[in-house]
Image (cartoon, rainbow, N blue to C red):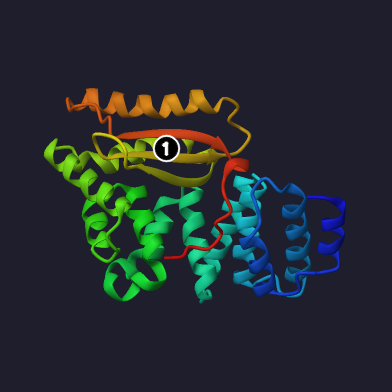
Amino acid sequence: MTDTNNDVLKRMPLVDYDKTLQFMQNLEYSDIDNINYVEQQLYTQLQSNQADTDLLVLMMHQQIMKGRGQRARSIAYRIWETGGQLRLSSEQIFIKDLMNLGLSDMAGAALASYIADLENNMANYGNLLLKYAIYSGNMTLLERVLIYFPENKDKIVLQDWIQLNEDYGVTKHIPAILNRIIEKVQDSMLGFSYNLFHDRDFPDIEFIFYVDDSIKNYKETGNLLNMQISTYCAAHKIEDLINLSSVVYPISRHRSDVAEKL
């Protein structure tokens, strides 16, 4: 970001939630100057209403972008304890960031009522429900969620992945395997995503973990996570899952995607 652009931003203060959200939606995780700018603007807004949970959700996400996982978790617990109604965009960001921070139980609890009525909640929560189903390794939920998605390559890969796990008799092990992986990076997690590969002889998913600077060797940590898969499979005498792998990156590599959209 050039000095000229920074000067323009200073003449455009983020005076409310909507303007701040709009600005953050186009903000790259590597843009430290503007991430700091958002933090200053949010602090100013929160001074007049420290209990504004919608603003706190944005602050939580800004702290993730800045690489401050423990600070973001602290804000997450504060929002959870405060309770109350979040606006739709805030709730979407909040639930996604609970997963990003490795707070699996809270994310599941926040989505429970929407899982109970999938058909009527897919429009607003479809991508979050899909992400949670994959994140938790819940094959039954994943299969149910996919019913409501349009036919495309990603859907085919996921359906084939479900079937392959079923064919190899490992479906019941997937949640435990994913939980074991997440536990290894939970304290450092700032983001979770995945890649689906369409050009291989088998349906393949690669889990992507974005972490804070407490992890220095990303490749080595990724190898450690993949070792957890092999170790689990060996201990339970099941075939090694070649259709599931993990990689680890610094949070600065994360793409800009603060809002979930179908």
In the image, residue 253 sits, relative to residue 227, either above or below, namely below
Q: Nearer the viewer, residue 50 or 131?
A: 131
Residue at 73% across, 47% down:
32
Residue at 41% across, 44% down:
194
**Residue 7 appears in view:** yes
**Residue 83 appears in view:** no
Q: Position of residue 91 (x, y in %)?
A: 50, 68
Q: Residues within 10 Å of mark 1 (few under 14, many from 20)?
A: few
Q: Position of residue 93 (x, y in %)?
A: 52, 62
The residue that disc 1 covers is 183
Q: Residue 204 falls in which quadrant of the image?
A: top left
Residue at 45% across, 40% down:
208
Instruction: Name which residue type carries label 1.
Output: Glu
In the image, residue 221 sits, relative to residue 257, either above or below, namely above
Q: Quick one: which residue is furthest to the front in this view?
A: 199
Q: Position of residue 29 (x, y in %)?
A: 64, 48
Q: Secondary structure at mark 1?
A: helix
Relative to residue 262, is residue 202 drawn left or right? left
Relative to residue 20, is residue 86 drawn left or right? left
Relative to residue 46, is residue 55 drawn left or right? left
Q: Nearer the viewer, residue 229 or 219?
A: 219
Q: Nearer the viewer, residue 172 or 197?
A: 197
